[in-house]
Amino acid sequence: MGIRRLFRIQDAVLLEHADVIAAQLHEDLSAFSAFDRTINEEFINRIQQMLEAIKSFPSDGELEGKLSEQTQRVNTALSGCYDDYKKLAHFTRKMLSSNPSIRNKFGMNEITKARQNQTKMLILMNKLVKNTNRYSVELSRLGCPKELIGGLPGKAEALLEASMAQKNSKNERRINAERRVQLLNNLFLLMKDLNNIARHIYRNDKAQMQKYLLPRLVKKQVNLKTDSHKMW
């Protein structure tokens, strides 16, 4: 289960708000520090460091593009394996009349599910590599090219490598997303602290207060005394 977001504000809106706050808080720092001494220059530095860390992550579009490339690579490898299976099937069917038991050895009952499932196809390809070597003499006698038999291990390896690369891309995307959400949550909590403090120290200066209110709060708020924080 991924990390739960603590806010409903769009990421871009939260980042823009934090950018503005980091710049303007210097001017009002004395008022905030008088209320809470942890709101100091180090607090501003923490905001800026979080912003830099969040912006350093690859965008969702970049990660999605990388995953799409790896998925296409898997599909290409799957197609290559299936093409070789069909070519090999021409010769293995010739063997059925004299040796019906080979049906299972060459995946004739598995190919329908395997052709669009990389895990099943890998299992099938390994079986084909093993049994084409075992029946290589008979396959050769029936006209099967040695290049077809010899190329099966490479096709299986290409599919394995593509599958691993796709898995790594999925993991990278998940890990980056979780780290980014955690940083965004931490940034939101800092903005929430400033939001709450501003309500106290600027309770008689609504214009100044609004500079520090969370964006959704400002957008939805009609009466500053309402319990609007539920809209975050």
Image (cartoon, rainbow, N blue to C red):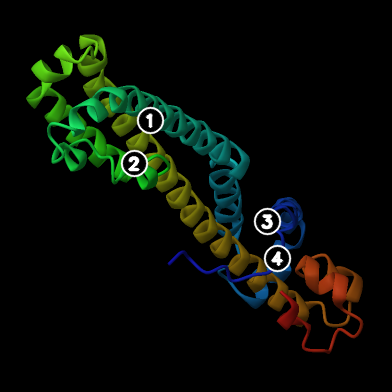
- Could you tell me the amino acid type at mark 1? Tyr
Res 118 quadrant in image: top left
Is tag 3's residue or tag 4's residue first in the polypeptide sequence? Answer: 3
- Could you tell me the amino acid type at mark 4? Ser
Q: How far apart are marks 2 and 1 (CA)?
A: 8 Å
Tag 3 and tag 4, C-beta contact below 8 Å: no
Q: Distance between the residues labelled 3 and 1?
A: 43 Å
Q: How far apart are marks 3 and 4 (CA)?
A: 29 Å
> Which disc is residue 82 wearing?
1
Is tag 2's residue or tag 1's residue first in the polypeptide sequence? Answer: 1
Q: In which quarter of the image is the C terminus?
A: bottom right
Q: Mark 4 points at which residue?
A: 30
The front one of 148 and 7 is 148
- The kind of secondary structure element at disc 4 is helix
Q: Mark 2 points at which residue?
A: 111
Q: Quadrant of the N terminus?
A: bottom left
Residue in the picture at 64% in, 73% down: 193
Res 197 quadrant in image: bottom right
Q: Mark 3 points at which residue?
A: 11
